[in-house]
Image (cartoon, coloured by chain):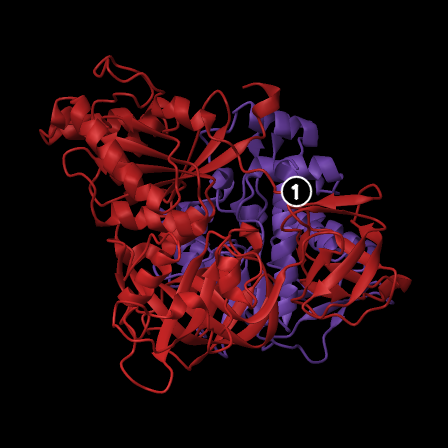
Amino acid sequence: MSKTHQHEQISIVMAGHVDHGKSTVIGRLLAETGALPQGKLEQIRAQCRRNAKPFEYAFLLDALKDEQAQGITIDVARCFFKTAQRRYILIDAPGHIEFLKNMITGASRAEAALLVIDAKEGIRENTKRHGYMMSMLGLRQLTVLVNKMDLVNYDEAVFERLRKDYTEFLERLQIHPVSFIPVSGMQGDNIAADTGAMPWYKGPTVLEQIDRFQTSRFPDTLPFRLPVQDIYKFTEQDDDRRIVAGTIETGSIAVGDAVVFQPSGKSSRIRSIEYFNGPAKIRAAAGEAPGFTLDTQLYIKPGEWMVRADEPAPQVGTRLRVNLFWMNRAPMIRGKTYKLKLGALRSTVKLVEILAVLDAAEIGVDSAKQQVDRHDVAEVILETPKPVAFDLIGDIEQTGRLVIVDNFEIAGAGIILAKAETVATTVETPLLHPVGAHGNTSKFAVSIIALTGVDNPDSPVLKRLNSQNAIVTMRTTVEGGGEPASLETVFKLLKQQGFILDYQI
Amino acid sequence: MNSLDRLEAHSVHILREAYREFKSLVMLWSIGKDSTVLLWLARKAFFGHVPFPLMHVDTHFKVPEMITYRDQLALQWHLDMIVGENTPALAAKQTYPDGALSRVECCKSLKSEALKHSLDGTWPRRRMDHTLGCLVDEAKPEAFTGVIVGVRADEEGSRSKERTFSARDCQNEWDVGDQPPELWKQYKTDFAPGTHVRVHPLLDWTELNIWEYIDRESIPIIPLYFDQGKGRRYRSLGCSPCTTPVDSTAKNVTDIIAELRGGKFANIAERSGREQDKEDGGGLETLRRGGYM
């Protein structure tokens, strides 16, 4: 192993539907990288001969699981192996929906993913659900293994059809897979070596592919964001420092930089960067967890964001449009008080509106649902009692995420799509005069519930829409009573005005 | 940032989170390499200070050098150190070395029971008096509900299933199958009254990481880990009757790192010298369900 890589380690999550062959592929990978305990492979082969069963690599994993149940060293949830390049942690994500919490815990720690699809069975429920969860978790490096190619006679057409279908699905989730590899875990084709079974395939083997995955880099070119975890003043041994502490999520900062705390808006300047048992620092960047002293004595609270005055400010507001998934048995309901954790912030929060509930497996939309059930993915409006600071997932991923605590448990996790504003009631613009559809001229009141893709979703909203690629959520009512305009009518009118709509209910 | 920088920052974040969320917090210190690295990380997190007490459970069967080293470091680093023990069992000679108990039973009595009652403040404890420079009886032992522990996921099976913030109920029991999700640096920090919480800042560290970090930071480590000329050293420290040294000529931290990287111990578990793990076909998971760390 070369000196340069001996410290490098990367976590990869293994996902896919039940019985699509994850265990076989993992067993193969462990065997072919020499990661199995001495004699284990021979032992399983011998057992199979005794029981007159054909040997399968999945049996290896089962054998290791038994050992794990007895408290011995090997862990199946996390397998360790190494290639000439670097060390690997392979996280086995359970294919069963009951273990979604474990899958999320595992996948949120991974830097890349391998998703297994059975060539014969094709795309199934958890093939989609896992794809969806990866998109929510921000996992962007994904390679799809089309497994059991031996069962479809190594047919290129089967592989190409699955590649096309699943790519289309992933693209709806804004995931662009790194590659698709046709494999057979059972026969070992394209796992560690090209066995010649599929001469039509010219790409990398699984081992070659994982060696090409990038380890995640800390995003130090984005705007600086420090969730203030705490403010320390330890007086022992005559220490008089007042230290703002936290882990830098993104960006970088230097001594002398002007900083602003959000949402309080208080400002100061960095006097020093504190770090125990190391040389004096004048600069700190994403991933580091140092402390800061300030030029002025400010009263700030844990939970605020420290940002740089010369960089784009975070959003501040009380209403957030969020895409969230729910893990608790008790559904998320309107009006109930939950706890919000966003960076270092803790606040109470309420669900005020459910815009749509998506079936994560089918990506179908159910707009009529009145609560968010376990394993649902929903687009909702959350409201906090006081303004909070946050970023949008499209701007800064690391600071556009939140979790919801219910009954002492992390029950939901979400990504912030937009700052939600209930735009002032009646917006009267030419596009809202229905001409044609109903044959009358009554005015619609359109309230914009939420906008995506607009820099500053403040009024006058509709004027800005012309030049923006925006997603609009709206509601129509009719002034002075009468028949409410149907959404179709509004869509038609918007289209007549030159808007390009790619989503309709 | 290299792997060690990342691991350090991650552990520091967890320690600060624990300090922020728990009012009655304590850190376990076994004097071994892992919990000493954990102690060092606390000094990193709090800029040279350790703003909570440390607890050592003394079984009275520890290698004597461990106690000397413990007290020296406690005085030098101004540590608020608490020492607990199972006094009645020791007095009645109800131990494995006295022939009264099996190894696992002895661990349960001298470690798990002693720890449980030292944590909840129901048994007498001693605390380091920095003016006198020695341990004195604690007047009113308080109960701790948050416990920081230096276990690593790569040590053995049951530890690999741990979460960073892990709840034990009033009976100190652990439901391995139904654990909370952890994502995006958000942990379970909300608990029903009466719940005890263990915080594990070292879960992601490997044995090699620990030694690489000791080397980088020049952390003073107890010399029992090094070969003193007899070709043997301790790889994992426990009670002397139940811990055997491994064959190794590693005389310092650099030698140990070379030995671990070279794969000398690649197929030998770190705790292979800890005899209680071997009783009952793997006693550690049973012990851990019952409150062993």
Give the chain of mark 1. A
| Residue B34 spot, x, y in % from top left | 61, 47
Query: Which tint is chain B?
Result: purple
Residue at the (75%, 61%) spot, across then down: A260
Q: Is residue A166 left or right of residue B248?
A: left
| Residue A359 spot, x, y in % from top left | 27, 59
Residue at the (58%, 64%) spot, across then down: B147
Q: Which quarter shows the C terminus of chain A?
A: bottom left
Residue at the (29%, 56%) spot, across then down: A360
| Residue B150 spot, x, y in % from top left | 58, 52
- Closer-to-camera residue (A182/B26): A182
Q: Which residue is mark 1?
A: A220
- Closer-to-camera residue (A266/A315): A315
Q: Is residue A375 visible?
A: no
Establish if A338 lies above or below B147: below
Establish if A72 lies above or below A404: above
